[in-house]
Amino acid sequence: MDNKKTLFSGVQPSGRFNIAGYIGAVSQWVKMQEKYNCIFSIVDYHAITIKQDPQVLKRQIKEVAKIYLAAGIDPKKSIIFQQSAISAHTELTWILNCYGVRMSDLNKMTQFKDKAGKNQESASVGLFDYPVLMAADILLYNTNLVPVGEDQKQHVELARDIAKRINFQFGDLFVVPQAIIKEEGARIMSLLNPKNKMSKSDTNQNNSIALLDDIDLAKKKIMKAVTDSGSEIVYDKEEKPAIANLLTIYAQLGNREIPRLVKDYQGKGYSDFKKDLAEVVAKFLSDFQTKYNKISDKEVEDVLNEGAKRAEKLAKYKLDEIKNAIGVK
Ligand code: AMP
Ligand code: TRP
């Protein structure tokens, strides 16, 4: 082994992968591949905490893998694998359920409250336990760094707490992981309501732009995006949340600096700004989809098989160490 730090992250194969997940998470992964030992998972067991159509799920698992590759994750440098292929993830989840987590920890999780809504009593136990599976994903690989969007910060904090508690009981069994959250773009907001985050589970497709959206449709969505009162293009999250969000998307997908954009749009109105942003989004999607369309199903299959082999070795070694520490092996 080299002495590079280990980095782990994942995306659920649920809903349609949108520009928010790309900006908040995947785009920063690509740059980290040189510096760290990177492991990227397609977390299908997280996806089934919400009902999924089996055929759609199968397709979306491949889709996320292709999106990783099209975004620039290189299977020669990084491990790319499907979570359910490695049973150590669910085994460790059980162990953490018994040793490191309390009901009161999970009762605090805001994502559970958001997703379960008013029907917490009828939500699945899996949805409640979701953060523990995520902690298992992270802790199984001695992960140092976890690059995610802002919404996952609380889950990474829980993984840290679990690691510390178990280390206290059993010695230094786990590496205590740390979240990496971008300063800009960690929370992309909905196009029609900048108070809500852009989300894959949103039923109104006009709130978000999927990476595989038809390009003309994506342009229309930008033109229809809400703006704030007034007419100036300024970056002010409190007073002008809609424009601040559009500026962030522009900067992130167009490789520009926000202060520079604000300068360039001085004296121009929302309509000019949105027209240009629509072009930036169109160019980004078109380049992305060109790469995506070149990746064959066979290539994805090979990458996932190879990734599972590499992940399994690491996971098995760690799980044995943990089983030994708690006395079942
Ligand atoms: P998910 O699609 O829910 O599995 O999320 C994949 C990654 O994208 C995670 O790291 C999330 O934190 C991140 N993410 C999801 N929604 C957003 C958003 N609206 N803005 C920024 N990052 C996000
Ligand atoms: N829960 C994360 C999300 O929805 C996905 C995820 C699962 C993850 N396991 C992980 C992210 C481990 C980072 C590390 O976005």
Image: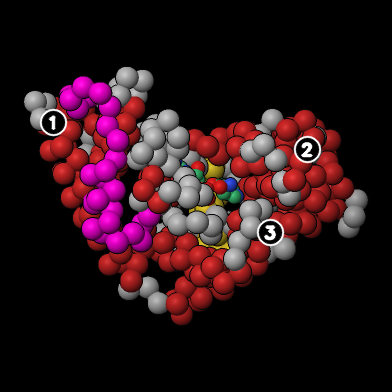
Q: Position of residue 191 (x, y in %)?
A: 35, 40
Q: CA distance from mark 2 to mark 3?
A: 21 Å
User: What residue is drawn where x is 34% and y is 24%?
Assistant: 237
Residue that mark 1 sits on? 269
Q: Is residue 130 left or right of residue 243?
A: right
**Residue 315: which disc?**
3
Amino acid carrying mark 1 in the image: Gly
Q: Are marks 2 and 1 in contact (CB under 8 Å)?
A: no
Callout 1 secondary element = loop
Percent across and percent down for residue 43 are: 59, 57
Mark toward the viewer: 2 or 3: 2
The CA distance from mark 2 to mark 1 is: 52 Å
| Residue 230 part of the magenta segment | yes
> What type is the residue that disc 3 sits on?
Ala
Where is 19 relative to 119, above or below?
Answer: below
Report if residue 115 is visible in the image.
yes
- Between 301 and 118, the one nearer to me in the picture: 118
Q: Say which of marks 2 and 1 sits in front.
A: 1
Q: Is mark 1 within 8 Å of ligand 1?
A: no
Q: CA distance from mark 3 to mark 1?
A: 54 Å
Amino acid at circle 2: Val
Q: Over which residues does the magenta segment extend? A: 210-234
Q: Is residue 163 visible?
A: no
Q: How would you rate the neighbour count of disc 1 (Cα within 10 Å): few for under 14, some for 14-19, many for 20 or more? A: few
Magenta stretch mostly in which secondary structure?
loop
Whole-percent x, y for residue 202 in the image? 48, 47
